Amino acid sequence: MGTAEHYHPRLRIIIDGKDVPIPANIGVDPTTGAMSAVHTHETDGTIHIEADTAGETFTLGQLFTQWGVTLTPTQIGGVMAQDGQKLDVTSNGAPVAGDPQDLRLEPDQKIVVRVP
């Protein structure tokens, strides 16, 4: 965790039409309280980016890796998109092509991941 850059993208996950809560304290060591540069505090989908160096690149995949949840173009956790479909991923309302893990996190970004 650093102080050179601090911003907050928001993540919303929708499966079967229902919002899935994002856990608090992803990327936070429960024993020491040490935090990764990409972490959560609340269950409201706010992702905290607190970087050592301004301009560092952080991705949605980093959050999911710390969370221990699989994220691919066709899967989130144990839920797979229906045959031939991919996850519906948007960033600030615009469709995201490619692997959602590669989505760069940005200030004030609103990310929605939906299983069709």
Image: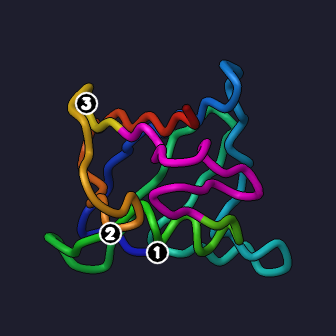
Front tag of 1 and 2 = 2
Write down the region rendered in magenta: 71-89
Measured in 3D between alpha carbons, the distance from the residue under mark 1 to the one under mark 3, in whole angstroms, is 26 Å
Front tag of 1 and 3 = 3
Image coordinates for residue 106, horizontal then vertical, percent:
24, 50
Image-quadrant location for residue 10: top left
Residue, far right: 31
Q: Residues within 10 Å of mark 1 (few under 14, many from 20)?
A: some
| Residue 112 placement, left or right of 22 | left
Measured in 3D between alpha carbons, the distance from the residue under mark 2 to the one under mark 3, in whole angstroms, is 17 Å
Label 2: which residue?
A: 58
Sequence-earlier tag: 2 or 3: 2
Q: Nearer the viewer, residue 4 or 74?
A: 74
Sequence-earlier tag: 1 or 2: 1
The amino acid at mark 1 is: Met
The amino acid at mark 3 is: Asn
Mark 2 secondary-structure assignment: loop
Question: Can residue 86 be found in the magenta stretch?
Answer: yes
Label 3: which residue?
A: 92
Measured in 3D between alpha carbons, the distance from the residue under mark 1 to the one under mark 2, in whole angstroms, is 13 Å
Label 1: which residue?
A: 1
Front tag of 2 and 3 = 3
Image coordinates for residue 94, horizontal then vertical, percent:
21, 31
